[in-house]
Amino acid sequence: MSRGQAAALANGAGVDVEEATTRFLLYGLLPGWFVPGLADWVMHRRTRIEDTSGTKESAIHALMMAEVGLPIALTLRYRINPLLLSLQLGAAAVHEATALWDVRTAVDSDREVKPVEQHIHSFLESLPFGGIASLMCLHADQVRSLLRGGRGDPDAWRLLPRRRPLSPGYLAGIGAAIGLCVLLPYGEELLRCGRTARGRRGRARAERGVPEAAKGEPGESRKESVKSCVSRFSWRPRVSSRSS
C-alpha cells in the first residue's frame, strides 16, 4: 500500500464497507453455500440413506432446506429491519436444533456418518451465523432498534421492499443454482427413499399373505403339487366287487 492510499484510508476515502460487505454476501457466502450442500447429498448417496434412515432423515433434510431458504428469500426481497432480523435469528436457531435431530436420526439408524460428512456439516451450520453476523454489522442501526423492541420506528415490524432491488439477472442465477444444487438432488433423494420404502412395504405385505403351508422348501412344495395333480387325474383300473 502506498503512502497516498494509506492517507486516503485514514481520511475515510476509497473504501465503501457497505458495498464490499454486500458483495461478499451476494457473490461469496451465498453461492458458496451450494458447494457443501451438494457434497452432503453425495455423502448421503454413498452411505445408501434409502436403506438405513430412509424417508425420515430425507424429510428432515427438506425441512432444513426450508428453514434456510425462507430467510434467504426474504432477505433478497426485503429491507433489513427488526422483523427480518428476528426471522433470521429464529430460523438459525431452529435450523441448529433440526441439525442435531438429523444427526441423531442418522446415528440411531446405523447409517455411517463419516468424518468427512461431519466436516461438511460444520460448514453448513456455520454459514447461517456468518451471514447473519455480516448483516448485523452492516445494519447496526437496525440491531439497536431490535434491542429496543422497535420503539420509535413505525416500520420496525413490517416487511419493506429493498430500496435498491437486486437485478433480475442475479435473482435468476441464484434461482437456477438453488434448483440445480438443492431442489434437484434433495428431491431425488426424497423420491429414492420413498420408492425404497414402498418396495419394502410391498415385500412385507407379500410375505404376510403367503400361507404357512407354502413357506417350506420351494422344491418340496412343487413336488407335493405335482403329486396332487397326478393323483387327481391319473387313470386307475376299476376292480369289480363281484367274484368270478
Image: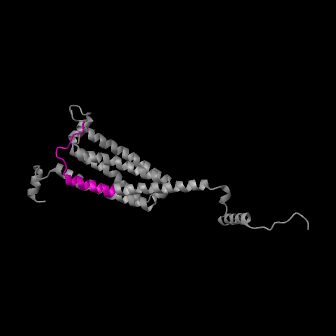
Residue 23 visible (yes or no): no
Q: Is residue 195 shown above or below 240?
A: above
Residue at image coords 41%, 56%: 189
Relative horizontal placement of residue 36, taking residue 171 as reference (left or right)? right
Q: Position of residue 8 (x, y in %)?
A: 9, 53
Main SS category, magenta section: helix
The way the protein has been coloured in the rendering is: one colour
Q: Residue furthest right?
A: 244
Relative horizontal placement of residue 221, taking residue 125 as reference (left or right)? right
Residue 176: within the magenta?
A: yes
Residue 147 visible (yes or no): yes
| Circle count | 0
Q: Position of residue 89 (x, y in %)?
A: 31, 43
Quadrant for the C terminus, please. Answer: bottom right
Foreground of the two, 9 or 163: 163
Quadrant of res 238: bottom right
Quadrant for the N terminus, please. Answer: bottom left
Residue 5: within the magenta?
A: no
Q: Is residue 56 shown above or below 241?
A: above
Q: Which residues are magenta?
A: 158-182
